[in-house]
Every structure is written in C-alpha cells, then in structure tokens.
Image (tube, rainbow, N blue to C red):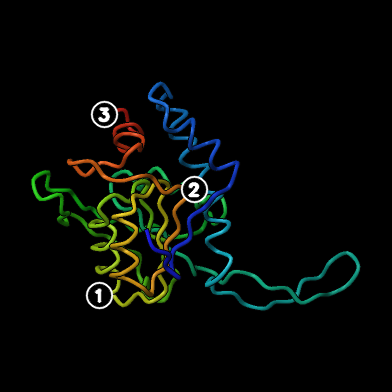
Amino acid sequence: MKNYDNVTIFNHPLINHKIAILRNEKTSMKEFRELIEEITTLMTFECLRTGVPTTECQVKTPLEVCNQSMVKDNAIAIVPILRAGLGMVNGVHVLFPSARVGHIGLCRNEETLEPYEYYCKLPEGIEDKLVLVIDPMLATGGSACDAIALLKKRGCTNIKFMAVIGAPEGVTRVAEEHPDVEIYVSTLDRCLNENGYILPGLGDAGDRLFGTK
C-alpha cells in the first residue's frame, strides 16, 4: 500500500500486545470488549494531538495564577458506526467523558459488500465539533466512506476516523475519497478475503463484542 499524508498506522508495542490477545479465537467476550476499549483509549491520545478546539484560561494554583490551555466545552463528538463501533465509545469517553455521541447505522449487503444506511442520529451542532468516527474494522472502506460523506452533508468539516484493524483496500479507499480526513489505524493487516473479511483479522468484531455468535 502506498503512503498517504492523511493516514497514520500505529506500531506501538503496547497496542501490538493487546492486538495479539484480541485476535485469539479463545479470548472471551468480556476480555475482547475490554481490549477494544483500552486500544481505543491509546489511539485517542495520539489521534487528538492536533485539531482539538481549545481555549485559554487562568488557573489559580496554591502558589500563583497561570495561563493554561483547555479543551473547549462541548467541542468533541463521537460517532460510532453501528454496531461494532459502540465497543469503542467508552475508550474515547475515558479521556473525554462529556463528549456527545451520535450514531450512524450502516448494514453491509452480503452480495455487493456495499453498505446501506438504516439509522442516523447526531448531536445538535455537530457541524461545529471535532467529530471522531469510530469502527473497529476498516475492511472495504464502504461504511467509513459513507459515514464520513453523511457527516460532511451535515456540515462537518473537522473529522477524524479511527479503526483498530485495517485492510489495505479499505485504508486506500477512505484516504483517496476523503483526503481531508485524518485516518488512524492501530494495525494494518494483509488483505481482504473473497467475502470482504480482513485477513488475518479477528473475525466479526460485532459478534465478538456482543456475543451474538
């Protein structure tokens, strides 16, 4: 896969350690869910190094008054792509507990492998916020591209996308269709199989998160 200016692939030993456990088919639902949240928190820390709306304020310490930068109130929105994206929300909330949460429901057509929208509920004023679109798996890139396009139609201009596992096909598609969106992926896997699943991957993230298979 070629390099893109708007794509960051993590190669962090702590994340890699957690990914190894996450992939294991014997990892329990509880541990899988906890690992997704922990990886998301680590990714969020790096993802939000830039682009976060801040304001200057004065803080009185026990010794003196100093100027300090703080994140603006109500400046960040989290938008998980249903349903697996729900597993990443708490990982962001650890760092930004007051972040509003919207939901975009996209279901994959198993024949065309393309997504279609079935639900969308977004916080008021989302167009003025930094929007974190989250989904554990970036496979074909169809759902991510459609979710980002939907947010842009709602007026959003400050969007970042985070996925735990990505396939070259999906990363390439999102990077090229949305060059103005920063993409963060903790691990880049080998490829997609004939059914559009990531290899080696970790199976169906939604099923493993919610125990539906």
Residue drawn 35% across the image and 44% down it? 190
Residue sitting at the far left:
111
Quadrant of image for the N terminus: bottom left
Decide if residue 59 is on the left or right side of residue 171. right
Amino acid carrying label 2: it is Thr
Residue drawn 81% across the image and 75% down it? 66
Image position, residue 115 (x, y; %): 17, 54
With respect to residue 69, does 92 lie above or below? Answer: above
Amino acid carrying label 1: it is Lys
Residue picked out by circle 1 = 153
Residue 212 — which label?
3
Q: Earlier in the sequence, mark 3 or mark 1?
A: 1
Residue sitting at the far front:
2
Amino acid carrying label 3: it is Thr
Quadrant of image for the C terminus: top left
**75, 62: nearer the viewer:** 75
Residue drawn 40% across the image and 27% down it? 29
Q: Earlier in the sequence, mark 2 or mark 1?
A: 2
Q: CA distance from mark 3 to mark 2?
A: 22 Å
* Quadrant in which residue 26 is drawn: top left
Image position, residue 132 (x, y; %): 42, 61
Residue 39 — which label?
none
With respect to residue 53, does 9 lie above or below? Answer: above
Residue drawn 23% across the image and 57% down it? 142
Decide if residue 200 is on the left or right side of residue 8. left
Residue picked out by circle 2 = 40
**201, 53: nearer the viewer:** 201
For the residue carrying disc 2, how many other residues have a C-alpha within 10 Å: few (<14), some (14-19), or many (20+)? many
Decide if residue 22 is on the left or right side of residue 202. right
* Quadrant in which residue 179 is drawn: bottom left
Q: Secondary structure at mark 3?
A: loop
